[in-house]
Amino acid sequence: MGRRTEETFSPRKPRWEEILGEQVIRVSGAASRSRGRFLVHFGFGLTMAVLSALFSSWVHIQNVNVRYEVSQRLLVQRDFIQARDKLEIERQMLRSPQRIIRLAQERFGMRLPAGEEQVVVK
């Protein structure tokens, strides 16, 4: 009974096995894998840089197009405002009392009443 049986006996791992168990051992060809990872990351970074440049260029072109459209519409608005102002001046000229009196006399034979012909309505 003082003897240990094989079932209850668990030999302790030697210290060198514990140290080696924690070590990372590289196999031959691991350097080429890390170089491959570098190339993949470099390629991804380069792709992202190119895509960023393309996106930036697209945004710039869209900005220029929008500014061009705005300036064109401002020119059209200015033309409409000038046309409106000309029409307002023409309307004021057509409504002037001197013109109306002249048209009434020429076209319809009307005249302004004399002082005794005027009637004041209260």
Image (cartoon, rainbow, N blue to C red):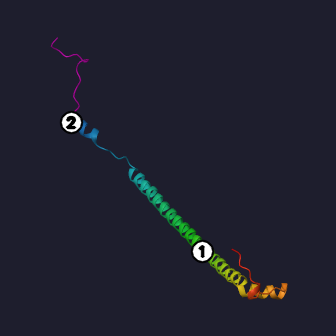
Q: Residue furthest front?
A: 116
Name the residue rendered at 53%, 70% in the picture: 60
Which part of the image, by quadrant, shows the C terminus?
Answer: bottom right
First in sequence: mark 2 or mark 1?
A: 2
Q: Which mark is residue 15?
A: 2
On the rendered structure, is 90 left or right of 31?
right
Q: Residue furthest top?
A: 1
Q: Residue furthest left?
A: 2
Q: What is the secondary structure assignment of the residue under circle 2?
A: helix
Q: Position of residue 70 (x, y in %)?
A: 59, 72
Q: Is residue 71 above or below residue 11?
A: below
Q: Position of residue 57 (x, y in %)?
A: 54, 68
For badge 2, the amino acid type reads Arg
Region rendered in magenta: 1-14
- Tell me which corner region of the image, top left, top right, bottom left or bottom right, holds residue 20: top left
Nearer to the camera, 42 or 108: 108
Q: In the image, which is nearer the foreground, mark 2 or mark 1?
A: 1
Name the residue rendered at 76%, 88% in the picture: 114
Q: Which mark is residue 68?
A: 1
- Mark 1 surroundings: few (<14), some (14-19) or many (≥20) residues within 10 A: few
Alpha-carbon span between mark 2 and mark 1: 78 Å
Nearer to the camera, 63 or 58: 63
On the rendered structure, is 39 left or right of 112?
left
Q: Is residue 61 above or below residue 3?
A: below
Q: Is residue 13 magenta?
A: yes
